Amino acid sequence: MNRSRAVKSLAALAQETRLEAFRLLVQAGPDGLAAGDLAARLDISPPALSFHLRGLANAGLVRSRQDGRFIYYSADYDAMQSLVDFLTENCCGGAACAPARTTGRKVIPRRLS
Amino acid sequence: MNRSRAVKSLAALAQETRLEAFRLLVQAGPDGLAAGDLAARLDISPPALSFHLRGLANAGLVRSRQDGRFIYYSADYDAMQSLVDFLTENCCGGAACAPARTTGRKVIPRRLS
DNA sequence: CAGTCAGTTCAATAATTGTTTAACTATTGA
DNA sequence: TCAATAGTTAAACAATTATTGAACTGACTG
């Protein structure tokens, strides 16, 4: 992942609708979701969805595959991982964002219950 | 870090000049860099820098402190870490971006109750 | 085939973002 | 106090991005 590719990826995610769309696709797993399904969950019009999915696809964050008259979109996990890696390496100054978390608490994301 | 905050942060980084400015500030360490120094390294005009720094500051990614007639900007490592954490948790489906890098079984994120 | 369904593309428009030049504020130092 | 330095703010403009409604393409079904 180079800088200009990172900028494209960041730009693709830097919008409410697209970020939420991507999140839904990640949640949906490798099979992804049909465009119409996604449009319904996001409550946006088909053209709006098409526009935003094109942005995500263009950045390489999602893939699409046609199945009958449905088009399924799915998240490209590798691309996302590359982006996170890029940010960690280039914008955090190391393995984790360096100087700030000197000592003390480590924030562990809370899941379940 | 919530979604709309993440969008703001992503938007702040989703531009060549700002991403590079932030990277330079991360590299510079906690003391940061004077605005003029940054402008020279980025080879942009003072107003252009001001504009972009405002974007980064607005997103909470950089802080500024005045010292004499210089204004030093520095990266907020915690904010950056929060963003990376958000992406990892919400857009990767787990600790690392899950299903794509399988050499065997699929690890599909499940929402558990 | 004709009709419908899923989705995209197009065109027009509104809104946001980035760049530039000029003018301004604050600090320093002679 | 005057001039220079560091940086921001303002205003005008260009470019990009987002939203909408209408028209289109391709795949299924009767």
Image: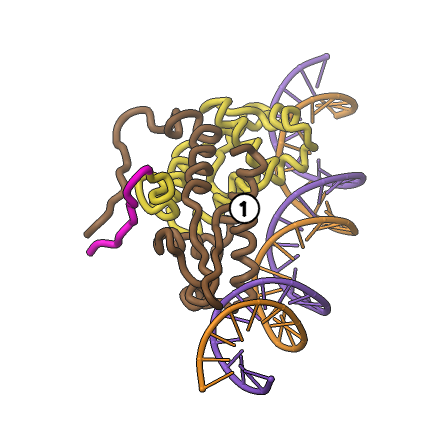
Chain colours: A brown, B yellow, C purple, D orange
Q: In the shown orientation, is residue D6 left or right of residue B87?
A: right
Seen in the picture, residue A77 relative to A24 is either above or below; the reply is: above
Seen in the picture, residue A16 relative to A60 is either above or below; the reply is: below
Seen in the picture, residue A7 relative to A20 is either above or below; the reply is: above
Quarter placement of the C terminus of chain B: bottom left
Tell me the amino acid under the disc marked 1: Ala
Q: Which residue is mark 1?
A: A59
Residue A19: where, in percent of width, then height?
Answer: 45, 52
Q: Residues within 10 Å of mark 1 (few under 14, many from 20)?
A: some
Q: Residue at 52% of width from left, 62% of height from top?
A: A49
Residue A47: where, in percent of width, then height?
Answer: 56, 66
Q: Main secondary structure of the magenta part?
A: loop
Residue B77: where, in percent of width, then height?
Answer: 42, 32
Q: Residue at 46% of width from left, 34% of height from top?
A: A87
Q: Check residue B112 for magenta coloring.
A: yes
Q: Where are the magenta residues, as a range?
A: B103-113
Q: Residue at 52% of width from left, 43% of height from top?
A: A9
Q: Check residue A62 for magenta coloring.
A: no
Nearest to the observer: residue C28 or residue B93 = B93
Q: Quadrant of residue C26?
A: top right
Residue B33: where, in percent of width, then height?
Answer: 55, 24
Nearest to the observer: residue D21 or residue B82 = D21
Seen in the picture, residue A46 relative to B68 is either above or below; the reply is: below
Nearest to the observer: residue A13 or residue B44 = A13
Q: In the shown orientation, is residue C9 left or right of residue A68?
A: right
Q: Quadrant of residue A37?
A: bottom left
Q: Residue at 51% of width from left, 34% of height from top?
A: A1
Q: Quadrant of residue A21?
A: bottom left
